[in-house]
Image (cartoon, helix red, strand yellow):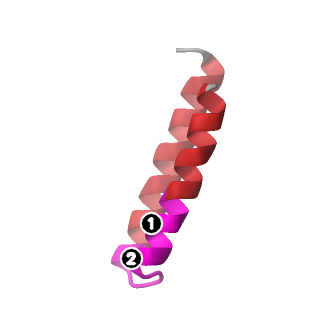
Amino acid sequence: MTEELHAAVDDFLRAADDVYDEYENGYVDADAALRMLERHLDELKAAAE
């Protein structure tokens, strides 16, 4: 794994944890959480290309 990809994975995992925390605390609903995760996943996929 390249350093850039490793950093992208770390960023994704942090962002995903943040989304889950926001959802569990009631700050976002399930639909918003899924949209946020999808955006972060798209960023990870772009970094992997």
Residue at image x 52%, y 66%?
A: 35
Q: How far apart are marks 1 and 2 (CA)?
A: 6 Å
Residue 17 position, x and y percent, is 42, 56
Label 1: which secondary element: helix
Q: Name the residue under label 2.
A: 30
42 lies above or below 10:
below
Residue 29 position, x and y percent, is 42, 82
Residue at image x 59%, y 15%?
A: 2
Residue type, numbered disc 2: Ala
21 lies above or below 12:
below
Disc 1 crowd rating (10 Å Cα; few below 14, some 14-19, many 20+) is: some
Is label 1 in contact with label 2 (beta carbons under 8 Å)?
yes
Q: Mark 1 points at which residue?
A: 34
Q: Please give the label number shown on residue 18.
A: none
Residue 22 position, x and y percent, is 45, 73
Residue at image x 44%, y 66%?
A: 34
Extreme residue toward the left, this view: 24
In depth, the one of 4 and 43 nearer the eye is: 43
Instruction: Assign the C terminus to one quadrant of the image.
Output: top right
6 lies above or below 31:
above
- Predominant SS of the magenta segment: helix
Q: In this view, does 8 lie to the left or right of 30?
A: right
Label 2: which secondary element: helix
Q: Is residue 24 magenta?
A: yes
Residue type, numbered disc 1: Leu
Number of numbered discs = 2
Disc 2 crowd rating (10 Å Cα; few below 14, some 14-19, many 20+) is: few
Q: In this view, does 38 lie to the left or right of 43?
A: left
Q: Does the magenta stretch include residue 45?
A: no
22 lies above or below 12:
below
Quarter of the figure with residue 26: bottom left
Q: What's drawn in magenta, residue-wise? A: 23-37
